[in-house]
Amino acid sequence: MLYRVLKGFSLSVLVVYFFVGVYANYVIEHASGDTSQIYPFASWGLFQRVPNTRSKFTFRILKAGEQILSPPVYFSEAQAYYTKRGNWPSNDEGRVRLLAEAIQNADAIQVKKFRTELEKNFIINPTVYEIVFFSINPLEFIHNGSVRELVVYAQFTSGKDL
Amino acid sequence: MKLGIPSITLFARDAKATGKAQIIVQFFYYGLLALAIWQMMNADRYLYLNTDDFSPIGPVFWMRLLPYQHAVYLVLSIFLTFSLVAATCFRYRFGRVFGFLAVLQFSAYDSSFGHPSHLWYLWLYGAFWFLFLPKTWNIKSQTTPDRRIFLLVIWSSQALVLLTYSMSGFHKVIGAIYQISKGEIHAFSPLAFALHVADTMVTVKQPDNIVGNIFLQYPLAGWPLMLIGEYMLFFSFFVVIRPSLQKLWGIGLILFHIINDMVFRISFYQSPILLAILFFDSPFVRDGITLNDIIADLPIFGWMWRVTVMKKFKR
């Protein structure tokens, strides 16, 4: 009797886990753009599409202290100028996205908040940087730094006008 | 022999299978203790994290009440002491409850930085299933129904772990079908692996990532790895009903994690340990398995093997 109950429970867990994962991955994530994970469940939808192009908000550094950077250095290359902290770097990129949205909405309070959080990680001050939206092919970007599309949202100098 | 859940009854008649299952449980809690010791000895990596996004979730709500570093030491202490209780008392349900609480606390803490972290999920699922093990541990005192439950619990933990890998493979195949329909480079394309490597490097530049850089210099080198990885992931759950493949899949998935760590710096060191415990000496693998059995049981290729080579030899 107990065996049958446990067997039914085990099979139910497997079926429910699979369908919740599929639902989270294809419905929740696509609807809200949020990650398809609710502790302690995961959809395990990792690396599910090959990134032919990557479009995202990021920042690039134009000047660090007295040093002019030409060409500008993007976030992904900026380890000499920016200290990534936290257990996952996407936290930093998420902050950049929120900052870009605040700029779009002309929300001065949020801009100040996210700038402050971002700028405390700059190693050299003042740092002149731009919040941008770019589209790249990752292989082209790595090999020759080429960017397919670039939109500059704003330019800031760390610690200034905050 | 094909194994479905009903065959557990056959294995339950053999004390040897239950003995192997007990070793799995034993090593599970020893492994958990080793991981807890490792976390405590590397406490610095948690103590000095950026806490901007730290927001303790349900099971570790109490961490809100303490200064961050004090709370971290306390959660590490809970992980270590509860794992110690589990490692010494795994034969008793209360010991296994401690084991579950240990990994629940630490995994919840690890998931409290703005997004869930699934690094500890497989251990959490294993610890959950082991709560259902029967009370009687001594094999001689166990009745056949006890052994059936014991083996069913092991089967369930194996199945859930393998399901997570299959789900990962499933999403990749669906993604590939979508990208093929769009005319894009897809998961089966020669450049897919290199694009993933490059994309990861754009997300977080890793100048000291020597292995990742090799695959950028020689983009086609990663193609076979990608295809083998997708094959193993997609068919992981299939191994639940083909136990002859469990050791092979255990090795393959461990290598998958190691390659991910070397190339993408995605460190899932918790999972390979669990894979070794669950699949290297599974109670559902009968004695005398030959290489021919293993090949014949492989998804797709096994079928091809059976209709070509084996048929030829039978003639």
Image: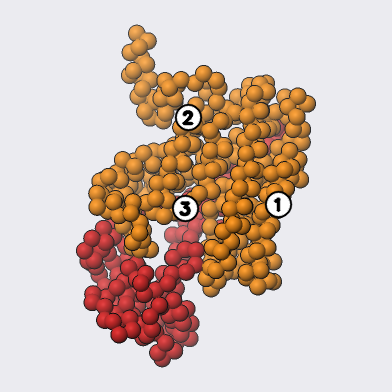
> Can you say whether B251 is above or below A116 in the image?
above
Q: Distance of mark 1 from mark 3, alpha carbons?
A: 24 Å
The residue that mark 1 highlights is: B82
SS class, disc 3: loop
| Residue lying at 21% horizontally and 63% vertically, measured from the top left | A144
**Residue at mark 1: chain:** B
| Residue lying at 35% horizontally and 63% vertically, measured from the top left | B205
- In which quadrant will I find the C terminus of chain A? bottom left
Image location (x, y in percent) of residue A13: 60, 43
**Residue at mark 3: chain:** B
Residue type at mark 2 is: Leu
The residue that mark 2 highlights is: B245
Q: Which chain corresponds to the colour red?
A: A
**Residue at mark 2: chain:** B
| Residue lying at 46% horizontally and 20% vertically, measured from the top left | B290
Horizontal side of residue A41 vs B22, given as left or right:
left
Residue A11 seen: no
Res B267 label: 3
| Residue lying at 66% horizontally and 33% vertically, measured from the top left | B22
Residue B308 appears in which quarter of the rendering?
top left
